[in-house]
Image: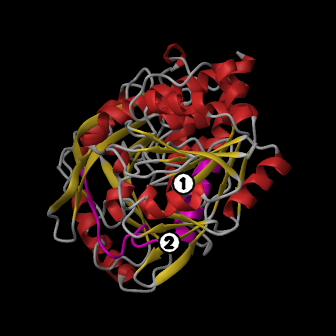
Amino acid sequence: MRPITAVLSNCQWPFGEGILRFLAGSPLVESVLAVCPEPVPFKGEKVRILPAGPISSGETLNQVLAEARTKNLLFLAEAGKTSLEPRALTKFSEAAESTAAGIVYADFYDEGEAGKTPHPLNDYQLGSVRDEFDFGPAILFSVAAVGKALDKYGPVPAVKAAGLYDLRLKVSIDHAIHRLSEPLSTLSEGSGPAGDEKLFAYVDPRREGAQKEMEAVFTEHLRRIGAYLSPRHFRGFPQDPGPYPVEASVVIPVRNREQTIADAVRSALSQETDFPFNILAVDNHSTDRTTAVLSDLASRHPALKHLIPARKDLAIGGCWNEALAHEACGRYVVQLDSDDLYASPRTLQKMVEMLRGGCGLVIGAYTLVDAALKEIPPGLIDHREWTDENGPNNALRINGLGAPRAFPSALIRRIGFLNVSYGEDYAAALRICRELRVGRIFESLYLCRRWSGNTDAALTIEAANRNDAFKDRIRTEEILSRQRMNRER
């Protein structure tokens, strides 16, 4: 018997005709299951048309799995936009055989007006549990591994959007996931969201139902691997009596933000509170006019402390550690990025009040705006998917927890920030919510400016991969820590 059953998702005529003929003509393919929203006029001995919903639905996926009689099951995304390299099927099959992996995936090409460009992917880790982890347009499952996983952990549930996610997580528990670092397929232009639309897809209210399914599937995965956190064990953080020079410090790490830093500082200075506070602007050896702007503001506003570290190897996390170690640091510290603003003069008061109630971390909501402070889609990012019962678990699935963030200084000094400029806040938040209560404020407290100077603006594929791999590593370490903590308990 030939080793592959191929499954084409979203096969619409005539766009999927090319890949259908390629698969039907391959000696490695036993059968082709074309999942089509509408009837397709294609005749072929190997081809079966399934008039079903998306392959991500549990109903469709279970129907496909019931028909798989080969060693491997190859899923292809976007039938009309995906093509395979000539030896792709052979290489997928050989890799599955030689590695005994449960899942095999491969790098691919993006194809646009400029031609084909390589699109490398990340290696899979224990912490690669994001539902949007990029496997590319072709992913091969071992049918034996799928059978063992479903026998051990139960069938794919009756979900509309989280079927493949559930299957992938179940297979990954006991089987390796192997990446081929060679482009074996091509995905044509316009096959997915880009820019901010992709960055904030997980908080799109139009996808709320899908996100709830993903959360439920992921929570069960954490239970299976011993990393689930029961809401019963979250505790408060006691207030540190001090002494402290002020009740709160607004921390602004900054490098080369001459266009925005004055607005950020004025936003902090305008806060109305019933307690004394200061602003710690950690100027990371700026080479533009940022240093001059801060020096001028500090000369006129005693609450602003202009700090220039002795070290020259600091990233954003290292700048935070500098502020925490400074003698002017207050009892609580509240984040403000150098190109953002507080949305209200009461932001600082509201966050500190919640910290005083015993939270180990407080996170607000923010509104996306452009350089002129005009709201832009998707607007308010409030992370209402967070619940006190399951937020610390779901935090491992999503890529961010919101802003602004505030911490008790005694706690975050003990934990410290990683000396990096991406994910340092996410790592600290995961560590805190492992054991301590997290406070959420769902009204907009913060204006997040999207402009060409943002650190995540126009990232290359390689840079985005590095960021994603780093967060996956943070999740890996956090999962291992939670497993160990649960075993000890």
Q: Using the rendered view, name the quadrant where residue 215 is placed.
A: top left
Say left or right for 355 vs 447: right
Q: Amino acid at mark 1?
A: Asp
Q: Residues within 10 Å of mark 2 (few under 14, many from 20)?
A: many
According to the picture, the residue beneath numbered tag 2 turns out to be 110
Question: Please, what secondary structure does the residue beneath circle 2 have?
Answer: strand
Quadrant location of the N terminus in the rendered image: top right
Quadrant location of the C terminus in the rendered image: top right
* Residue drawn 64% across the image and 20% down it: 153
Q: Position of residue 70 (x, y in %)?
A: 70, 38
| Callout in the foreground (1, 2) | 2
According to the picture, the residue beneath numbered tag 1 turns out to be 134
Q: Position of residue 248 (x, y in %)?
A: 36, 45
Say left or right for 267 vs 123: left
Q: Using the rendered view, name the quadrant where residue 64 is placed.
A: top right
398 shown above or below 86: above
Q: Amino acid at mark 2?
A: Asp
For the residue pair 132 and 329, the one nearer the viewer reads as: 132
* Residue drawn 44% across the image and 27% down it: 59
Query: Residue 55 shows which numbered tag?
Result: none
- Visible residue check, residue 344: yes
Question: Please, what secondary structure does the residue beneath circle 1 have?
Answer: loop
For the residue pair 407 and 11, the one nearer the viewer reads as: 11
Q: Position of residue 420 (x, y in %)?
A: 58, 61
Please say whether residue 395 is one of the residues in the magenta stretch. Answer: no
**Where are the magenta residues, as a range?**
446-473
* Residue drawn 37% across the image and 79% down it: 290
